Image: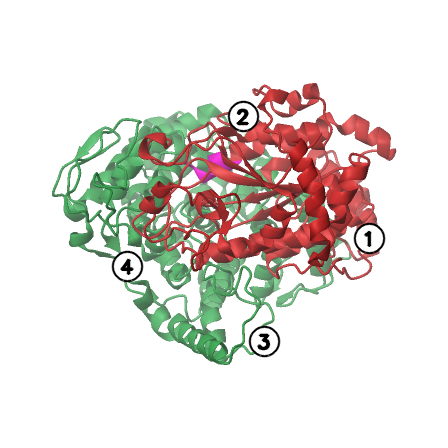
Amino acid sequence: MWTRSLAVLSLLVVIAGRPEAGATPALPSTDEAIAHALNRLTFGPRPGDPARVKAQGLQNWIDLQLSPARIDDAVVTTKLARLETLTLDSQAIQRDYSGPAMMERRQRKEEAGASGASGASGASGANEETMSGRTGGPRRNVSDVQLKDRQVIADIEEAKLLRAVYSERQLQEVLVDFWFNHFNVFAGKGATRNYLTEYEREAIRPYVLGNFRNMLEATAKSPAMLFYLDNWQNVAEQSAQRREAPSPTRATGPSPTSANGARPTRGINENYARELMELHTLGVDGGYTQADVVNVARTFTGWTIRPREGSGTQFVSRLHDDEVKTVLGRTIKAGGGQNDVDQVLDILAAHPSTARHIAIKLATRLVSDTPPSALVDRAAARFTATRGDLREVVRTIITSPEFFAPETYRAKIKTPLGFVASALRATGAEVRSALPLARELREMGMPLYFCQPPTGYADVASAWISAGALVSRMNFAVALGKNEIRGVRIANPPADLDQQIGSPGFQRQ
Amino acid sequence: MTSRRVFLKSGAMAMVTMGFAPSFLARTASAAGTGKKLLITIFQRGAVDGLNMVVPYGEADYYRARPSIAIARPGTAEGAIDLNGFFGLHPRMSAFKPLWDRGDLAIVHASGSHDTTRSHFDAQDYMESATPGVKSTRDGWLNRYLQTAADAHDAAVGQGRNPLRAVALTSQMPRTLQGVAPALAIGNTADFAVADMGARTSFEGIYQAAQDQSLHGTAGEAFDAMRALARQTAAPYRPANGAVYPRSPFGQALQEIARLAKSDVGLEVAFAESTQWDHHVNQGAATGQMANRLDDFSRGIAALAQDLGERMADTVILTMSEFGRAVAENGSRGTDHGHGNAMFAIGGSVKGREVYGRWPGLKADQRFEGRDLAVTTDFRDVFSEVVVKHLGASTATAAEVFPGYQVKAPAFRGILRM
């Protein structure tokens, strides 16, 4: 945090003076190393980028990318200005966009029901967890109200692509993509989409080079996560006689059925508690038990929202289980109220399994599908030593000898987003509307903000190399070369542009 | 077993009046094993609630544990569709009832993995690799089958490696089919082409010359498949026998499978997935979220069986999901992650109209860890029976498909005729 206020030069001096940085040799200065750094730490080099980094010095460039607030980003800021929903809060989106659209849909449904018409049911129809909120796709009788509602998702999809292509704060954007994916929420699940704009803007973006514990808390208490992983419905069991807290053994958690067989009408929902430990912090082998899942769920009881109003997060103490809980062998005392979750997040964020889990995931993204264990160990140690300072963890990884080892060059296969953004950057394309590109990504199996499972998208080659994916990429390259992608223009494309963008080499980074 | 065969035949005759002829049954009886085998696997991602899909309505504890989401007993309003006096299908799965009645559909209940994970990601991984508890397995079980049976197949086909032998109708290659044997993942057969012929020729050249082994190999499969598909997909597809697929992604994926199966591209293994089964909140009962998903699921599969018609004699459709859900509903009228689950097997060689596996019961002390349906059938007992009896692999070959698991006939549940 303190580094932010210092000048670049003094920052460098301080870093060089640190013991762990002092042992690190100077970064390589070869053209290959610069190309590698641009491939991994940006959405792909633009023409002229390698020369600029060389002139600036690789170390200086990396340091600057690690302090994005110092980088002027006027170009993309201007481009984003026309996306009017980006700065709105969830209440405004609910009130002016999704609310009216939902009212209209309900009204139409009632009218259709009254006239006896019934469409084909199937997966869509009455199921609210469909992708019907997505942008694009021809639809009959789309009213202005519905179009306006779609603008919300369209704007964040467009913003993500514009930032990937045009932002000068490239490492920040790479990391926003990484951390959103780590704390994934799915725009296709009910009200999640109303909260998405605010979620990325306020729970993810401010922390990607900040403190992990803060990002964890911001996501945990975000309406988007509370809705997506169902915690808004997680409430204390309201049985007449509350049973004792379960023992922290591997055996069983409390049975939801009370002793006399009568079931309370409401009770805990484990969904968030489990994913919090499995995906967000400890990792699946991080050492938690089913009893821990139950106890963490109990600490999160009462944290809720009112989705229909787009309301913010609130803690309702009468819905909270205020008895004693044991989490990973540590006692959360009775009567903790809304502070229970702070204790749990402290325990989880400081746990060595979390340091390791985050180190592995970051190194997999930035270095290779199978990151060297020595590097993972150092990154995890840095996480622990800095209490989750993500800037320092990332710095450890991207200035490491392992990062610059020649065998890591081009070792990663680009995701569809990486492929499309890097193609636009490499060709100097002008993007006037990014929505057709969002549609291309959907075809390639990576719809932005529509990754359904909480795992997020896989970050390894096996997920993205397939015959179908390659054909999609080749077709994208052909269309780009012919200037046939709507909203995108390349001035004087070379005749072999398609062969460059569709080549095996360009699929790697 | 003999009585079942007798039933099948009489059942088949009884069904003649039902509109779609039970021809694949008749053919099974007369010409079993002569056709080219096809296995279609369907993954219900998100852990379907097997207890509301195949309802143990004979269990009082089922109703006690689920006061707001239980499916009513057969004969009551919106009740389960009775199967055998103890189990019933969810009422929105009526499309499966004719298949059951004809003896083409079997259920394996209380099946799953002996690994205790309640993580979607791990459990899917374990089921798709078919090595529960072992994360280091590199390939999926169906890819290993393709590897072990590659030589015999290639010799029979006489044209080298056929990329359309195994196809997933998904935009990403499922873990089940990942591995060194060729397999395709394609969202849609009609779009699977590089239309610009000049560019296509150049691409084929540069990928052929590429040192990059994985991209070289994948591109080779892509170009081979493109040529084979171009011959098949020129005309728009019309389902046969009056089959109507749901207009959902799942329904369309199954229709693409039927199209490939009926063409001569050499399809042996197909994969499709049905998603959004993770109903922690407001899962519904006879109607609601899960009911809508089951409607899509069952109508899609029933349409596929109807469309394939006679081809079903040589086809097995096998469904699976990573784990089941807790016996008791949670505090939000949904269900949390559980353990044992139900699988469906459909096809001409299936000894249907039966729920296989030992039913463990739902009383608290009969549950796994006091809360979930226990697993009494290892899912690999079912997979290996299909590999041996349906795909015709030897026990030794099947042992390579299921490392760390002993393939032996006594473990088979007898779901398939030999």
The answer for how far apart the CA atoms under marks 4 and 1 are is 52 Å
Colour in which the image shows chain A: green
Q: Nearer the viewer, mark 2 or mark 1?
A: 1
Question: Are the residues tagged 2 and 1 within 8 Å (C-beta)?
Answer: no
Question: Are the residues tagged 4 and 1 within 8 Å (C-beta)?
Answer: no
Q: Secondary structure at mark 1?
A: helix
Residue behind mark 4: A305
Residue behind mark 2: B136
* Quarter assignment of residue B136: top right
| Majority SS type along the magenta span | helix
Determine the residue positioned at 37% across, 75% down: A96
Q: From the image, which quarter does the N terminus of chain B lie in?
A: top right
Q: Nearer the viewer, mark 4 or mark 1?
A: 1
The answer for how far apart the CA atoms under marks 2 and 3 are is 49 Å
Q: From the image, which quarter does the C terminus of chain B lie in?
A: top right
Chain drawn red in the picture: B
* Quarter assignment of residue A193: bottom left
